[in-house]
Image: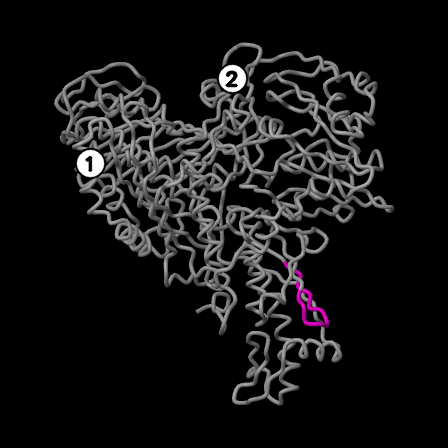
Amino acid sequence: MSHLSERPEKPVVGVPMPHESASLHVTGTALYTDDLVFRTKDCLHAYPVQVFKAHGKIKALNTEPAMAVPGVIRVLTIADVPGVNDAGMKHDEPLFPEEVMFNGHAVAWVLGDTLEAARLGAAAVEVELEELPSLITVREAIEVESFHGARPTMIRGDIDEGFANSVHIFEGEFEFKGQEHFYLETHCALAQIDEAGQVFIQSSTQHPSETQEIVAHVLGLHSHEVTVQCLRMGGGFGGKEMQPHGFAAIAALGAKLTGRPVRLRLNRTQDLTMSGKRHGFHSSWKIGFDAEGRIQALDATLTADGGWSLDLSEPVLARALCHIDNTYWIPNAHVAGRIAKTNTVSNTAFRGFGGPQGMIVIEDIMGRCAPLMGLDPAELRERNFYAPNQTTPYGQPVGQTDRIGKIWHQTQDNADWAERQREIEAFNAAHPNTKRALAITNIKFGISFNLTAFNQGGSLVLIYKDGSVLINHGGTEMGQGLHTKMMQVAATTLGIPLHKVRLAPTRTDKVPNTSATAASSGADLNGGAIKNACEQLRSRLVQVAATQLGGNASDVRIIDGVATLLGSDKTLDWDTLVHTAYFQRVQLSASGYYRTEGLHWDAKIFQGSPFKYFAYGAAATEVEVDGFTGGYQIRRVDIVHDVGDSLSPLIDVGQVEGGFVQGAGWLTLEDLRWDTSDGPNRGRFLTQAASTYKLPSFSEMPEEFNVTLLEDATEEGAVYGSKAVGEPPLMLAFSVREALRQAAAAFGPAGTSVDLASPATPESVYWAIEGARQGKPAVQGYVTNGHALNGNGHNGNGSDGNGSNGNGSNGSNGHAVTGATALSGV
């Protein structure tokens, strides 16, 4: 076992325990960024001047009316920027734009003594706009070829040969929507200037170092003149990885110009209309299977809706391409990616970071194609699992392939798969207007940042004379339990009880140049860095203990706060050991560092091994669907998930549950809508409140929810044998969508293939049911390479991928399909 993954005697890691701030959360005493305003004297409030047109050039900006509003102190405009007028890392996001790029774009900010004064001042600012044509949907962008950023292509094998060897060939399109983060705490920043002109910012950010960098270049300062602190976030989910920087820069600019603290907090409507979301995608694809249903070739194009600027769209797209295989061996692949430029908010990171968008494409294909080949969807999936010594389409060996099947079968066993399938079959036969279905899907998710340089972490650990320990690391806490795990790592490495350890807020002047808390890498990177710092301290202390106990340092053990010597009854308690070390002038602080080894990636040829390891999991979900309304219930969920040897099991189970529910929200409920008309409100975000944007609630929870963490799953080369848990569970929710597909298909004849929109809202499920009843959603009958399609269908006309009617070449096997997301036989 590797040094990094080996656990000592009586470790604190692996012990179930509540979140370190749980009691503060539930009692309301936990402090968030905006809570600090009430502790800050003479604070100004910032309010945006939004322009509610989708696209246009600013011809004039008159701020004088705002200055006439009582309580307005200043209006910030482009003329006030001393440094670089840009809020992004790609220099395509002007902080004060001269061109409005989406409906709700902020072009100036008003500072007031009160929030109401700032609001009234913003309403008084006059903006003269020359409206320009706009693109709202990804399809509109594709039609006029409006793209930006990189256009990667992933190639393996020879797809022409693969299709030539295929018995069944299908092609189609699939467009699916994005997702709003809807964190409880909206974007917020509080900036102050000290007597030396240093800038201090409290920010709700997942990436304090990048917030620091952006603020510095906007103000024309060096990074050491800017300090960013993040106490905690009320949720992030990726929405606070890149997008907080501009808001922090506005607050800092206002503080610099006025000399007073400035608070910027978006209300919910502003947050929804100004901040980016999960990328929606359009996909077109062609896939070939052999006679047994094994994939032979995949040719696909993925188009991400990037919005008006690049933000993180390029790495999101790259990860989507890297995950289109999921757990399936694809010997011949050609997958192209591109980013649509539209006049909507700039889409950004969201839990899974492109992985869900890539994986849903192949899962949709498997779910749609299985009935057309006369196969159960679970059987088709299992036949295509990775085998040992196989590699991904981008060339990375797929390790631990045995876990794919092991988890799959354990999930089926836990779910009483065979017995419940029989029960469902009997139920469906007896209920013509209500159907149930049980579906299983699995995941393979790569852990590490695609950009190799980001895979590093730092820490600072301080031991005080009384034996208490304070740890600092570069990760941020957004409710996911990272700080809890880091305290457990520190206590385990030092060999002391957990109550001896306290964690300080994340600050850029304690640990510099940190990566974002993202890519599910927070525990891996920061845990490795904390372990490194604590090992330095431990090695110094065991030398002191050896002297005191009269033995060799190699024979000293520190367990539960007591140092002992092998073969001796002598002991030395931790507090005495630390006190002795201080008087022997032993350094009691250490800076730790960790870098993920074994990564390499060539983005130009899209080849390499960008991930340290893969996290695996499977979920079996049973649903019940009402044939009259399309309404449904999630009856039961069984999950088996691989977190290696868990650092904190209670935290990890919570992450699996939360990730699954958020994924189910994306796939079934959360329906982003924009005004796509040519009217005056074109481009307006329509679902801009909880009343119109449906979030998962108790009513959507499974009646029975079983989560099992895979046992005996040590991950070599990761901190204390653990695996990341933040993002992978979200994709377990594919099982919900696939169960809904199968339930809808049950309203039609056997072998019906259902085209199901995403999100699969009750309305979408209803139309899928209607299509199944009428035999529409599927594929035309055809003959491929001399083999007839074995679907159990009905006589009738098929509709091709363009929505036009066409007769099946083999009428008895003819299946129909609906327009834009259709399958067509080749």
Task: Relative to 239, say whether 769 is above or below.
Answer: above
Q: Is residue 265 left or right of residue 184?
A: right
Q: Is residue 553 left or right of residue 194?
A: left
Q: Is residue 757 left or right of residue 718?
A: left
| Residue 427: image tag | 1
The scheme the figure's colours follow is one colour
The magenta stretch is 459-469
Label 1 amino acid? Phe
Task: Relative to 200, say whether 676 is above or below.
Answer: above
Q: Position of residue 223 (x, y in %)?
A: 74, 46
Q: Nearer the viewer, residue 57 or 751?
A: 751
Check residue 466 for magenta coloring: yes
Q: Which residue is mark 2?
A: 675
Label 2 amino acid? Asp
Q: Nearer the viewer, residue 729 or 220?
A: 729
Looking at the rendering, in which quadrant would you find the C terminus?
Answer: top left
Give the residue at the far right of this rendering.
195
| Residue 540: image tag | none
Helix, strand or loop for disc 2: loop
Q: Position of residue 145 (x, y in %)?
A: 48, 21
